[in-house]
Amino acid sequence: MRQPPKNTIARDAVKAWKISEAIFMGIVWAVVIAGFIVSIIFDFPLWYIGLVIIICSISTYLFVFVFPKVRFKRWRYEVFDQEIYIQHGIFIVTRTLVPMIRVQHVDTKQGPILKKYQLASVTISTAATTHEIPALLEEDASTLRDKISALARVDEDDV
Amino acid sequence: MFEEKRLHPAVIFFNFIKTLKEAIFPIGAGFFALRNEAFIYFILASAVLLIGLITFSILSWYRYTYRIEDEELRIEYGVLVRKKRYIPKNRIQSIDLTEGIIHRLFKLVSVKIETAGSGTGAEAALKAVKLTEGKQLREELKEIPEQKSMLFDEQTDNIRKPSAKIEFKQLFLAGTTSGSIGIILAILAFLFSEIEQFIPDAFYDNTYQMIIKLSITVIILLAIAILVLIWLLGIAGTMIKYGNFTITRNNDELFITRGLLEKKQLTIPLKRIQAIGIDESILRQPLGYASIYAEVAGGSLEKGEDFSSVLFPIIKTSKIDAFLQKFLPEYISNRDDLVELPKRAKKFYLLRSMYPIILLIAGVVYFWPQFSWIPFILLIASMYLGFLRFKDGGFCIDDEQLTIRYRRLNRKTVVVFHKRVQSFEISQHKIQKEQKLATPILSIVSDLGGRHYRVKDLEIEDVNRLADWYSYR
């Protein structure tokens, strides 16, 4: 576990994340603007709305333009015969080992944003945890799913 | 046992009471709405409702049948919608017999049957059958034909069937040191802070001094009375819950009976045990006592605090190994010789325990400067707790067995086997990376989906060793 995993996820993940973060921030901005208008109508002090706008601008910059790239750089995975090895995290880097015999089921998922870029994510569930490899190319995702499900044979142990 | 059977007719009564409880609110509302002008309608409606409930209770008792057929427990029930539930014997994980107070009057027992599903309710619950019938049912459901070997069973039965029972003294101690004392301390702290506030004001006015003094005495006495009451209730609660606590190992399962008023029997199959934990609560640890619990997968067995199954509510720390030797010898571990946290982790532990309190201090000093001393005492206490957390963290690998120890408030030592760990994680933030520290996280199955154990800020080399131990490569 000393070496990080080899495989990176699809490069388009950055675009997909940017879009979804942009949508989220758009909602936040809508709320902020509504608050701004209300403050003007009711003559509330404006300094705190200014503060909120500054915070929002900074977080928009971070979430939409900085973090997706960093997250992409960090996201690695590697599938061995006996286990799955995943690394992710921006500030807190997490490396996870999931033994194949503990895998209960594997799913592939695709939302509208991922679909736009022909991406899909793979979710691996054990009896206690779920792990997601986000944004792989569609065909990579389905081969990975099939590979993991073939490798994850039912063990005689309970659970 | 092929013929269809019904539950004991007492179930009619139970069902009736249960539905009546649900109907009591509309009846009460009806009473208040109609008590003047249309009281006769209220009586009529109530009578109809009552008769309806009674009929319904009888019908649902009548429809509820169970039988054992083709290695399955088959239950058919439902008045309006008929339901059939077939549970194969070999899917049954545990069968619990519970005797409530009313049950005991009639020598009845309720039988709960659990499968591995993680739902909250029991898979099947026979609300009341005769005690003998319940025991017979359990024996029949437990037998799985291909595994049955009469000779072997008899032998092991006779040779070892270790058992342990709680003593009164232990039980009393368990009650005294139960969680209720925490509530008492909180109330005490609150009262002291309040009284502090009362007294100086009281001296201003001579006329009322006597009265106020008196009222303060009354308040204090009342408070003490309440505290003693809570404490006694805590003791009584523990006594009722864990009275006659007996654990027996029977071949490949643990069998627990407990309860003074309501007798509960539960069976934990050994192969469903995911981990064994030793919980030394902050009150019991100085006295040298701990409790032993098991993390059991699936089902909704009767759970203690934290959703774990209590294997023994209170035990002298020095006797834990003897207890494990008797019941679960494979879970004995080298608890006193753990790989400890590196010295440089101490500052993280102290900081982590301090920062919520520092926020509190800022708030209190700003708003109630006269109470500044309270958060400062809290700060010292929490720093000490942080230090204890640092001192207690550790792990030990012994072949397939892993022991980890950590503390939040209570010190917990958990023993888990390699094959029970579902996934392993290393988490490391920027500062940890600089300091060559990392946090391992182990996940095991428990009733609430999963339980995650972590020991923060271990030496990175030690964490890598853990990863190598876990990795199959």
Image (cartoon, grey):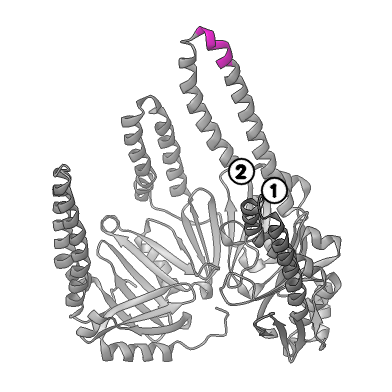
Dot 2 lies on which element? helix
Q: Is residue B67 above or below residue B385?
A: below
Residue B237, numbered circle: 1
Please state which amino acid type lies under the numbered disc 2: Ser
Where residue B85 sits, quadrant-wise, is bottom right
Say if the magenta span includes residue B312.
no
What number is the disc on residue B256?
A: none
Residue B425 as seen in the image, left or right of residue B312: left
Residue displayed at 39% across by 45% down? B353
Disc sitting over residue B180 in the figure: 2
Q: Tag 2, which chain? A: B
Q: Give A43 or A137, whichever is nearer the viewer.
A: A43
- Dot 2: within a 10 Å radius of its alpha carbon, few (fewer than 14), some, or many (20 or more) residues? some
Callouts 1 and 2 close, C-beta under 8 Å = yes
Question: What residue sits 21% from the left and 64% below the top?
Answer: A27
**Extent of the magenta region:** B206-213
User: Is B243 drawn above or below residue B358 in the view shown?
Assistant: below
